[in-house]
Image (spheres, helix red, strand yellow):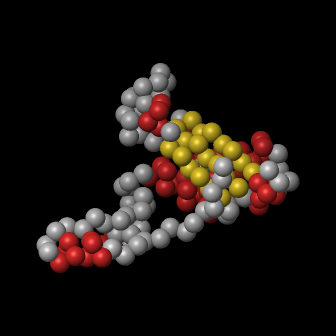
Amino acid sequence: MFTRLAPAQVTAPTATERNRVSRGASVVTRVRPDGGACQETAGAKMNVGRPVYTAITQKLTRALAPTVLNVIDESAMHAGHVGNPSRGDPSAETHFRVEIVSDAFEGKRQVMRHRMIYDALSEEMDNPIHALQLKTKTPSEVSSA
């Protein structure tokens, strides 16, 4: 159900990609959602890719130091629903499911765990997040399951 959180990595071009470049073809640049792999804009604030997804991932990682973090964007499934603030835009980032395992949840009830997440994501909860489904566990709860 949960997968281990791996650090983001930028990979070097493959041999096939290098050969294409030597023949004058363009290469596919592998850029993380936060733009971190782009050398020309390294360190610059970027609003490309998936800004809400990226903000959720970064803020929860900083606030809760999770051992497992799965952020699933379910926005496209809700694009046409009544009350959805995106007005049918399938690319809008409005609905998310978060599965998180953190030592920070130890000894805390679900309500307090959820408050911790809402506090970390307060800016996004005001707008643009319309719905957030949470599954919070401690490492001991995962290992005993």
x and y percentages locating residue 124 in the rendered image? 54, 46
- Closer to us: 95 or 125: 95
Q: Residue at x 47, y 21 (%)?
A: 82
x and y percentages locating residue 35 in the rendered image? 39, 63
Q: Is residue 69 visible?
A: yes
The residue sitting at the right extreme is: 107
x and y percentages locating residue 44 in the rendered image? 38, 68
The residue sitting at the top extreme is: 82
The residue sitting at the front extreme is: 16
Q: Residue at x 47, y 70 (%)?
A: 9
- Closer to us: 137 or 49: 137
Q: Residue at x 20, y 74 (%)?
A: 21
User: Relative to residue 81, is residue 16 drawn left or right?
Assistant: left
Establish if 100 lies above or below 5.
Answer: above
User: Relative to residue 109, is residue 13 drawn left or right?
Assistant: left
User: Relative to residue 133, is residue 139 drawn left or right?
Assistant: right
Q: Is residue 43 visible?
A: no
x and y percentages locating residue 69 in the rendered image? 62, 56
Please tell me how many numbered marks the rendered image carries.
0
User: Relative to residue 142, is residue 61 drawn left or right?
Assistant: left
Q: Residue at x 19, y 67 (%)?
A: 26
Residue 13 appears in which quarter of the rendering? bottom left
Residue 79 appears in which quarter of the rendering? top left
